Image: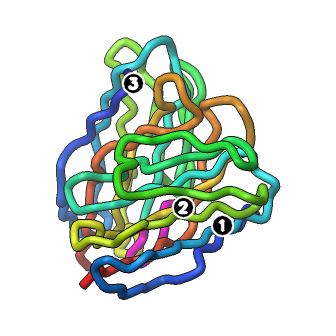
Amino acid sequence: DVKVTQSSRYLVKRTGEKVFLECVQDMDHENMFWYRQDPGLGLRLIYFSYDVKMKEKGDIPEGYSVSREKKERFSLILESASTNQTSMYLCASSLGPQGNQPQHFGDGTRLSIL
Amino acid sequence: GNSVTQMEGPVTLSEEAFLTINCTYTATGYPSLFWYVQYPGEGLQLLLKATKADDKGSNKGFEATYRKETTSFHLEKGSVQVSDSAVYFCALPSTGRRALTFGSGTRLQVQP
C-alpha cells in the first residue's frame, strides 16, 4: 500500500513565523500535491509537483512556497504565517503523467496560527 | 474547466437506512470519476472509481454508476452503519493539469 506521511498531526505557530510542513511518500510517485481543507470550501489546491525541482501553482498559492529536492519529499512553506492560514493541510501523491490517476493522501496537519 | 457539484450536508440517517449522495459534473470528454471518504481525524481515502461511461465502481457496499446522459456519479449504499459516518468527496481530473478537482464534501452522520 502507498504510504504518505506528514511530519506533524498538529502544529501551533505564531504570526510572522516561517513554517515548514513536510510530506514523504514511499511509492516512487511522480506527482505530489498540497491542499488546504476548510469547512464549506472542500479541498483547494495550493501547489503541486510532477518531478524533482519542478512545481506548479494551484488555485491558492499566495503566501506559500514549496520545495521538492528529492522525489519522495515535498515541503510546503509558509513564508510569514498569518492567522488566515489556520487550516487543515493535506499532502497527496499520484503515480504518473495521466491526469486520471487516483491520489493517495496523508493524515493531514492541523495548523493553528496565533 | 472541469468541475463537480455535490449535495450539501449534513445528511443524517438511522442505521440500516438507504444512502444516496448526489454528484454531478461538468467536463470535456469522459474523464475518470472518483469518490473519496474522510473519516474523523484522517486524510482522504479512495472509496471507488469509474473510468468510463456506464462503469459501476463499488467498494465496502458503496456503489456509483458513471452516467454520461445525466453527467452524474451518485454514491449509494443499501444499508448504512454507524461506522460509515464520515465526509464524502466526489472528484474528477482537473483541466490541463495532473490534479483532481474535488467537490465541497458531504458529511454523513449515521445514528444507532
Q: Residue B65 location, x and y as percent?
A: 46, 31
Q: Give, as a single range, the part of the protein colored magenta.
A: B39-44
Q: Is residue A50 magenta?
A: no
Q: Residue at x 35, y 50 (%)?
A: A62
Q: Identify the coloring.
A: rainbow
Q: Residue at x 22, y 62 (%)?
A: A39
According to the picture, the residue beneath numbered tag 1 turns out to be A4
Tell me the amino acid under the disc marked 2. Cys
According to the picture, the residue beneath numbered tag 3 turns out to be B2
Q: Residue at x 64, y 73 (%)?
A: A5
Are the residues at dot 3 and dot 2 in contact (C-beta closer than 8 Å)? no
Q: Chain of mark 1?
A: A
Q: Nearer the viewer, residue A45 or B14?
A: A45
Mark linked to residue A91:
2
**Magenta-drawn stretch, dominant element (helix, strand or loop):** loop
Secondary structure beneath dot 1 equals strand
Q: Is residue B103 above or below residue B4?
A: below
Are the residues at dot 1 and dot 2 in contact (C-beta closer than 8 Å)? yes
Whether callout 3 and callout 2 share a subunit is answered: no
Whether callout 1 and callout 2 share a subunit is answered: yes
Q: Residue at x 47, y 63 (%)?
A: A90
